Image (tube, grey):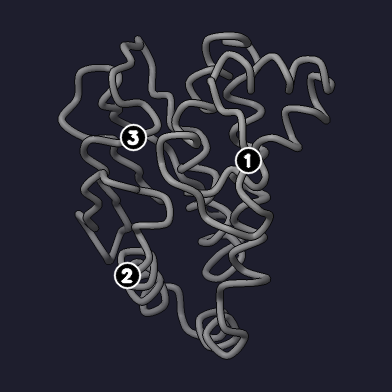
Amino acid sequence: MSILHLLPVIGEVLGEDARSHVLARSGVTQLPEAEVFCDEAPAAAIHQALRQAFPDMAEQITRHAGGRTGDWILATRMPPVASMTLSRMPAWLAAPVLCGLIEKHAWTFAGSGEFRVANRSRPVFELENNPVVRGEIATHPLCSWHAAVFERLFRSLIDPDMACVETHCSACGDRACRFEIT
């Protein structure tokens, strides 16, 4: 999982002292090298520490970081020919193809969780046992980072008006975190 963009956004929005506080609270003492996906445990710990330390700002920060992560995927992980091809296809055809690409690379954001595409034509993703919220209890969905990554990919490659909403969250007692693209 990537924390490449989350930590800088915490620093930019809340300041370096807050960033250090989140890191200390998470127990993460060594950060992965830039551009490297890290083990899910430190990534999940940082997400959870952010929500605990700054509950009123966590959603805004993780959405911003998720958007940056989506941009990074498009710039460094998505072959240019794939981006160009998807952006030229009609949305009804491109969306299922993008779903397949996301599913193929789900390990990068799902970790040990179980990811599946529940619907390809009207994209719906489900992530069971999501490490980012594992063990948490909430009254509202918490996975704004995931939603923002998906939203950025679909807006950039399929339709700039598309949005992603997490409609169910395992932290709320649901079977899986569910993300719907509209």
Residue type for callout 2: Lys
- Residue 24 position by quadrant: top right
Tag 2 and tag 3, C-beta contact below 8 Å? no
Q: Is residue 156 left or right of residue 9?
A: left
Question: What residue appears at the point 21 percent right and 35 percent down from the top-left corner?
Answer: 176
Q: Tell me the SS state at disc 2.
A: helix
Callout 3: few (<14), some (14-19), or many (20+) C-alpha neighbours within 10 Å? many
- Residue at 68 percent across and 71 percent down: it is 75
At 50% from the left and 33% from the top, the residue drawn is: 144
Type of residue at label 3? Pro
In three-dimensional space, the C-alpha distance between marks 3 and 1, rounded to whole angstroms, equals 18 Å
Question: What is the x, y in percent for residue 100?
Answer: 31, 72
Mark carried by residue 131: 3
Residue at image location 34% in from the left, 48% down from the top:
111
- From the image, tell me which residue sits under label 1: 31
Q: Amino acid at mark 1?
A: Leu
**Image location (x, y in percent) of residue 35:** 64, 60
Q: Give the class, few, some or many, for how many residues have Cα within 10 Å of label 2's Cα (few <14, many ≥20).
A: few
Compare marks 1 and 2 and give the one earlier in the sequence: 1
Q: Which mark is residue 166?
A: none
- Residue at far left of view: 175
- Determine the secondary structure under disc 1: loop
Question: In the rendered image of this protein, does residue 58 appear above or below residue 114?
Answer: above
In the picture of the structure, the residue carrying the numbered disc 2 is 104
Q: Nearer the viewer, residue 167 or 2?
A: 2
| Mark 1 crowd level (few <14, some 14–19, many ≥20, 10 Å Cα) | few
